[in-house]
Image (spheres, rainbow, N blue to C red):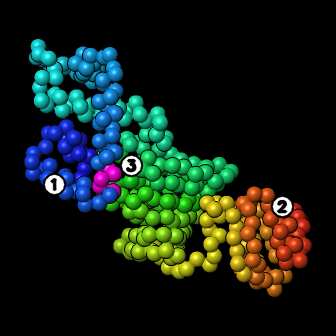
Amino acid sequence: MNDQQLIKYILQETSEAENRAIQTWINEDNANRKQFEQIEWIWKSSEKLMASSPVDENAAWQRFLAKKEKGFQSPVIRKQRFLTSPWARAAAAVVLVFASIWAISAFLPQSGRAYYSSVDLQSDQSPKEINLLDGSVITLNKNSNLSYSQKLFGKQREVILKQGEAFFDVKRNESKPFVIQIEEVTVQVLGTSFHVKKAGELTEVIVTSGSVAVSLGERSEVLKPNDKLTINQKAETMMKSVPENQLYNYYVTKKFEVEKLPLEQLTNALSHAYDVEIIIQAELLKTRPITTTLEYGSLENNLKVITETLAVKASTVDGKIIIR
């Protein structure tokens, strides 16, 4: 059910058959009811706005038309009170809805700009958690950027991941799927949480809850919790596997939690998180298991925990960290 039909229903401009269809649709699913309640809330807010406004709505509407048509030939305006026309009342109501959205948008994430255009989101040297208009949450890892939009009358919520990695916790809405584009790779969900990483020609998707559909050209895969998919866009290949560990979402949990994990896997995650090269000199030490929880804070403190836990030494040589 699109938003225009719901607005018409709220304005009591629908037929009996349309009323029954909309009422059935609202009762079918909680997501449908929520969508209707959001539109209804906007409408009621607009009524309150008009009730408290000293502005003559007829005069305001005529000024709006004059500005809109400026530079074009003006149509002949009948000398009658504008809002006596049923169609004019409906048009004015729609304008009031959009005026209300504009007034309320100052309190919405990104000022509500995603309702009518694309919004660029980026992080600098640290992860950034961002709330979206639909209640979804994106956690951008450092040095990552994307754009997103969820047009008010659009059929889907759209994200373009341009660089880096992000963790998505998507609010379920069956009437508006959440679609992420990473060059030629398309990820589509209804409501779930998952990690996406873009690194050159490779795209990585790891699902933590719900299900995710990933497609590249004519190929597609459906991922379930704890599924990992690695896509090579140049070779047009998809490889499904299980994540080696849970360190991929350290920027979301703010922790590095490991249990009997080879030391090299932990140091690889630390290298990625802190932009530093960590080298383990002894081959046997690379596979030595470690169980610990490190806070995503001071690298120096984390290295101290590792050295004390495994009774090893760490030193810095030419900007690289050597563990021996």
Q: Which of 14 and 59 lies nearest the eye of the viewer?
A: 14
If you read the primary sequence from the N terminus, does the residue marked by circle 2 or circle 3 appear first? 3
The outermost residue toward the bottom is 284
How far across and down, in percent of the image, does residue 63 sit? 27, 17
Residue lying at 51% horizontally and 54% vertically, measured from the top left: 137
For marks 1 and 3, give the one nearer the viewer.
Answer: 1
Which image quadrant is residue 248 in? bottom right
Q: Residues within 10 Å of mark 3 (few under 14, many from 20)?
A: many
| Local SS, label 3 | loop
Q: Estimate the x, y position of residue 76 in percent, counting from the top left.
A: 12, 17
Disc nearer the start of the sequence (1/3): 1
Q: Write the start and end of the magenta stretch as one range.
A: 31-35
Q: Amino acid at mark 1?
A: Ala
* 3D distance between C-alphas at marks 2 and 3: 42 Å
Residue 255 got which mark? none
Tag of residue 21 = 1
* 92 vs 114, nearest the viewer: 92
Q: In the rendered image, is residue 198 in sight?
A: no
Disc 1 from disc 3: Cα separation? 25 Å
Name the amino acid type tagged 3: Gln
User: In terms of secondary structure, what is the magenta stretch mainly?
Assistant: helix
Q: CA distance from mark 2 to mark 1?
A: 63 Å
Q: Which mark is residue 300?
A: 2
Q: Secondary structure at mark 1?
A: helix
- In this rendering, the answer to whether 176 lies above or below 192 is above
Left or right: 324, with 225 as reference point: right
Asked if residue 120 is among those painted magenta in the image, a careful observer would answer no
The residue carrying pointer 1 sits among few (fewer than 14), some (14 to 19) or many (20 or more) residues within 10 Å by Cα, namely: few
State the residue at coordinates (53%, 80%). Answer: 241
Is residue 34 within the magenta segment? yes
